[in-house]
Amino acid sequence: MTDLIAKTGAPRLRADATRNRERIVAAAQEVFVEFGPDAPLDEIARRAGVGNATLYRHFPDRRELSRSVVLSVFDTMATQAEVMIAEADQAFDALEQVVHGAVEWKVGALCPMFAEWMDPAEPELLAAQNRLDSAVEAIIEKAQAEGGLRTDVGAGDILTVAAQMARPLPGSDSTDHDLFVHRSLQLFLDGLRAPGRSALPGRPVTLMDLRRDCTALSER
Protein backbone atom coordinates (compact mmCIF):
# COMPACT_ATOMS: atom_id res chain seq x y z
CA MET A 1 0.00 0.00 0.00
CA THR A 2 2.86 2.37 0.83
CA ASP A 3 4.37 1.79 -2.60
CA LEU A 4 1.02 2.48 -4.26
CA ILE A 5 0.63 5.78 -2.42
CA ALA A 6 4.16 6.76 -3.32
CA LYS A 7 3.54 6.12 -6.99
CA THR A 8 0.11 7.74 -7.35
CA GLY A 9 0.27 10.41 -4.67
CA ALA A 10 -2.93 9.17 -2.98
CA PRO A 11 -4.39 5.86 -1.78
CA ARG A 12 -6.91 4.17 -4.06
CA LEU A 13 -10.50 4.84 -3.04
CA ARG A 14 -12.60 1.95 -1.76
CA ALA A 15 -15.43 0.85 -4.06
CA ASP A 16 -18.11 2.47 -1.91
CA ALA A 17 -16.13 5.70 -1.68
CA THR A 18 -15.71 5.71 -5.47
CA ARG A 19 -19.47 5.27 -5.93
CA ASN A 20 -20.15 8.11 -3.50
CA ARG A 21 -17.76 10.37 -5.37
CA GLU A 22 -19.38 9.54 -8.72
CA ARG A 23 -22.86 10.18 -7.30
CA ILE A 24 -21.75 13.53 -5.90
CA VAL A 25 -20.25 14.63 -9.23
CA ALA A 26 -23.38 13.56 -11.16
CA ALA A 27 -25.65 15.39 -8.69
CA ALA A 28 -23.42 18.48 -8.78
CA GLN A 29 -23.60 18.63 -12.58
CA GLU A 30 -27.39 18.55 -12.38
CA VAL A 31 -27.65 21.12 -9.59
CA PHE A 32 -25.07 23.50 -11.08
CA VAL A 33 -27.02 23.53 -14.34
CA GLU A 34 -30.26 24.19 -12.47
CA PHE A 35 -29.05 26.83 -10.00
CA GLY A 36 -25.74 28.10 -11.39
CA PRO A 37 -22.21 27.96 -9.91
CA ASP A 38 -23.43 29.21 -6.50
CA ALA A 39 -25.84 26.29 -6.11
CA PRO A 40 -26.33 25.12 -2.50
CA LEU A 41 -23.98 22.28 -1.64
CA ASP A 42 -26.59 20.87 0.76
CA GLU A 43 -28.85 20.23 -2.24
CA ILE A 44 -26.04 18.45 -4.06
CA ALA A 45 -25.47 16.16 -1.07
CA ARG A 46 -29.20 15.47 -0.80
CA ARG A 47 -29.54 14.50 -4.47
CA ALA A 48 -26.42 12.35 -4.26
CA GLY A 49 -27.88 10.52 -1.28
CA VAL A 50 -24.92 11.29 0.98
CA GLY A 51 -24.36 13.40 4.05
CA ASN A 52 -22.68 16.79 3.97
CA ALA A 53 -19.65 15.33 5.73
CA THR A 54 -19.19 12.80 2.92
CA LEU A 55 -19.40 15.54 0.30
CA TYR A 56 -16.77 17.67 2.05
CA ARG A 57 -14.54 14.67 2.62
CA HIS A 58 -14.34 14.18 -1.14
CA PHE A 59 -14.52 17.85 -2.15
CA PRO A 60 -13.21 20.30 0.46
CA ASP A 61 -14.42 23.36 -1.46
CA ARG A 62 -16.73 24.44 -4.26
CA ARG A 63 -13.91 24.97 -6.72
CA GLU A 64 -12.69 21.38 -6.45
CA LEU A 65 -16.24 20.08 -6.93
CA SER A 66 -16.79 22.35 -9.96
CA ARG A 67 -13.48 21.23 -11.40
CA SER A 68 -14.46 17.57 -11.06
CA VAL A 69 -17.79 18.20 -12.79
CA VAL A 70 -16.09 19.90 -15.73
CA LEU A 71 -13.49 17.13 -16.04
CA SER A 72 -16.17 14.44 -15.87
CA VAL A 73 -18.33 16.02 -18.58
CA PHE A 74 -15.38 16.75 -20.87
CA ASP A 75 -14.05 13.20 -20.46
CA THR A 76 -17.44 11.59 -21.11
CA MET A 77 -18.16 13.69 -24.16
CA ALA A 78 -14.68 13.21 -25.62
CA THR A 79 -14.94 9.45 -25.20
CA GLN A 80 -18.35 9.39 -26.85
CA ALA A 81 -17.14 11.54 -29.75
CA GLU A 82 -14.10 9.31 -30.31
CA VAL A 83 -16.29 6.20 -30.35
CA MET A 84 -18.84 7.82 -32.67
CA ILE A 85 -16.34 8.90 -35.32
CA ALA A 86 -14.86 5.40 -35.29
CA GLU A 87 -18.20 3.60 -35.59
CA ALA A 88 -20.52 5.86 -37.59
CA ASP A 89 -20.97 5.11 -41.29
CA GLN A 90 -21.10 8.85 -42.04
CA ALA A 91 -19.35 11.55 -40.02
CA PHE A 92 -22.48 13.71 -40.13
CA ASP A 93 -24.29 10.98 -38.18
CA ALA A 94 -21.57 11.20 -35.54
CA LEU A 95 -21.90 14.99 -35.50
CA GLU A 96 -25.64 14.73 -34.86
CA GLN A 97 -25.04 12.44 -31.90
CA VAL A 98 -22.37 14.73 -30.46
CA VAL A 99 -24.58 17.81 -30.73
CA HIS A 100 -27.59 16.09 -29.19
CA GLY A 101 -25.27 14.78 -26.48
CA ALA A 102 -23.95 18.28 -25.76
CA VAL A 103 -27.52 19.42 -25.15
CA GLU A 104 -28.22 16.44 -22.90
CA TRP A 105 -25.14 17.26 -20.84
CA LYS A 106 -26.07 20.96 -20.71
CA VAL A 107 -22.59 21.94 -21.85
CA GLY A 108 -23.71 25.54 -22.39
CA ALA A 109 -24.20 25.90 -18.65
CA LEU A 110 -20.61 24.83 -17.99
CA CYS A 111 -19.03 27.87 -19.66
CA PRO A 112 -20.05 30.36 -16.90
CA MET A 113 -19.03 27.84 -14.24
CA PHE A 114 -15.72 27.19 -15.99
CA ALA A 115 -15.08 30.93 -16.25
CA GLU A 116 -15.91 31.69 -12.62
CA TRP A 117 -14.27 28.79 -10.81
CA MET A 118 -11.60 27.34 -13.08
CA ASP A 119 -8.13 28.31 -14.19
CA PRO A 120 -8.32 27.52 -17.93
CA ALA A 121 -4.53 27.14 -18.04
CA GLU A 122 -4.50 24.36 -15.42
CA PRO A 123 -2.81 21.42 -17.18
CA GLU A 124 -5.45 18.74 -16.44
CA LEU A 125 -8.36 20.96 -17.42
CA LEU A 126 -6.55 22.19 -20.51
CA ALA A 127 -5.75 18.62 -21.57
CA ALA A 128 -9.38 17.56 -21.09
CA GLN A 129 -10.68 20.48 -23.12
CA ASN A 130 -8.09 19.96 -25.85
CA ARG A 131 -9.07 16.29 -26.11
CA LEU A 132 -12.75 17.19 -26.49
CA ASP A 133 -11.96 19.97 -28.96
CA SER A 134 -9.83 17.63 -31.07
CA ALA A 135 -12.54 14.97 -31.16
CA VAL A 136 -15.25 17.43 -32.21
CA GLU A 137 -13.06 19.10 -34.82
CA ALA A 138 -12.09 15.71 -36.29
CA ILE A 139 -15.77 14.85 -36.75
CA ILE A 140 -16.49 18.21 -38.39
CA GLU A 141 -13.50 17.99 -40.72
CA LYS A 142 -14.45 14.46 -41.76
CA ALA A 143 -18.10 15.42 -42.32
CA GLN A 144 -17.00 18.33 -44.52
CA ALA A 145 -14.54 16.14 -46.44
CA GLU A 146 -17.29 13.60 -47.07
CA GLY A 147 -19.54 16.35 -48.42
CA GLY A 148 -22.21 15.94 -45.75
CA LEU A 149 -21.57 19.19 -43.84
CA ARG A 150 -21.44 22.62 -45.42
CA THR A 151 -17.90 23.98 -45.47
CA ASP A 152 -18.64 27.52 -44.30
CA VAL A 153 -19.32 26.58 -40.66
CA GLY A 154 -16.97 25.84 -37.78
CA ALA A 155 -17.24 23.92 -34.53
CA GLY A 156 -17.87 27.18 -32.67
CA ASP A 157 -20.89 27.96 -34.86
CA ILE A 158 -22.44 24.60 -34.12
CA LEU A 159 -21.79 24.49 -30.38
CA THR A 160 -22.87 28.11 -29.88
CA VAL A 161 -26.31 27.40 -31.32
CA ALA A 162 -26.57 24.09 -29.48
CA ALA A 163 -25.72 25.79 -26.17
CA GLN A 164 -28.32 28.51 -26.74
CA MET A 165 -31.01 25.99 -27.67
CA ALA A 166 -30.27 23.96 -24.55
CA ARG A 167 -31.39 26.84 -22.32
CA PRO A 168 -35.13 26.99 -21.49
CA LEU A 169 -37.00 30.08 -22.64
CA PRO A 170 -37.67 32.62 -19.85
CA GLY A 171 -40.74 31.61 -17.92
CA SER A 172 -40.97 28.16 -19.49
CA ASP A 173 -40.99 24.89 -17.60
CA SER A 174 -37.73 22.97 -17.96
CA THR A 175 -39.61 19.68 -18.39
CA ASP A 176 -41.57 21.06 -21.33
CA HIS A 177 -38.35 22.43 -22.80
CA ASP A 178 -36.68 19.03 -22.69
CA LEU A 179 -39.57 17.58 -24.69
CA PHE A 180 -39.07 19.81 -27.73
CA VAL A 181 -35.42 20.89 -27.63
CA HIS A 182 -34.17 17.86 -29.57
CA ARG A 183 -36.81 18.42 -32.23
CA SER A 184 -35.65 22.02 -32.65
CA LEU A 185 -32.04 20.89 -32.59
CA GLN A 186 -32.65 18.44 -35.42
CA LEU A 187 -34.17 21.22 -37.52
CA PHE A 188 -30.96 23.18 -36.96
CA LEU A 189 -28.78 20.19 -37.86
CA ASP A 190 -30.71 19.63 -41.08
CA GLY A 191 -29.82 23.21 -42.02
CA LEU A 192 -26.12 22.36 -41.71
CA ARG A 193 -26.21 19.77 -44.47
CA ALA A 194 -24.40 20.53 -47.71
CA PRO A 195 -24.97 22.29 -49.95
CA GLY A 196 -25.78 25.44 -47.98
CA ARG A 197 -28.94 27.27 -48.99
CA SER A 198 -27.46 30.75 -48.46
CA ALA A 199 -24.17 32.55 -47.93
CA LEU A 200 -23.32 33.10 -44.27
CA PRO A 201 -22.02 36.50 -43.13
CA GLY A 202 -18.63 36.70 -41.46
CA ARG A 203 -16.32 33.74 -40.96
CA PRO A 204 -16.72 30.33 -39.31
CA VAL A 205 -16.54 30.47 -35.51
CA THR A 206 -13.87 28.21 -34.04
CA LEU A 207 -13.62 26.47 -30.69
CA MET A 208 -10.76 28.84 -29.86
CA ASP A 209 -13.20 31.75 -30.31
CA LEU A 210 -15.52 30.14 -27.76
CA ARG A 211 -12.64 29.52 -25.38
CA ARG A 212 -11.70 33.21 -25.53
CA ASP A 213 -15.34 34.09 -24.74
CA CYS A 214 -15.25 31.89 -21.62
CA THR A 215 -11.95 33.46 -20.56
CA ALA A 216 -13.34 36.97 -21.10
CA LEU A 217 -16.25 36.16 -18.78
CA SER A 218 -13.82 35.32 -15.98
CA GLU A 219 -12.03 38.65 -16.36
CA ARG A 220 -15.13 40.83 -15.99
Image (cartoon, helix red, strand yellow):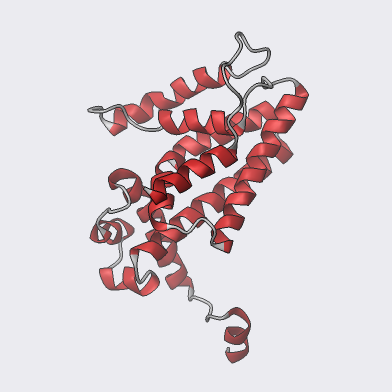
Expressed as whole percent of the image width and height from the top left, the position of residue 73 reads 50, 50
Outermost residue toward the top? 197
Q: Is residue 17 left or right of residue 50?
A: right
**Count of labels shown?**
0
Q: Relative to 53, is 166 on the left or the right?
A: right
Q: Nearer the viewer, residue 18 or 198?
A: 198
Q: Name the residue rendered at 65%, 21% in the picture.
A: 152
Quadrant the N terminus occupies? bottom right
Toward which corner of the image does residue 216 lie, by quadrant?
A: top left
The relative height of residue 3 versus residue 65 in the rendered view (above or below) is: below
User: Where is residue 10 drawn, in percent x and y?
Assistant: 53, 80
Whole-percent x, y for residue 41 in the image:
27, 60
Work out whether residue 30 can be spotted.
yes
Q: Residue furthest front?
A: 220
Q: Residue furthest bottom?
A: 2
Taking the spot 30% from the left edge, 57% from the top edge, the residue there is 44
* Rendered view: 136 above or below 193: below
Residue 105 in sight from this viewpoint: no
Depth check: give the residue in front, 155 or 1.
155
93 lies left or right of 51: right
Q: Is residue 13 left or right of residue 1?
A: left
Q: Residue 40 at what x, y percent from top left?
A: 24, 57
* Relative vertical location of residue 42 with respect to residue 82 in this rendering, above or below: below
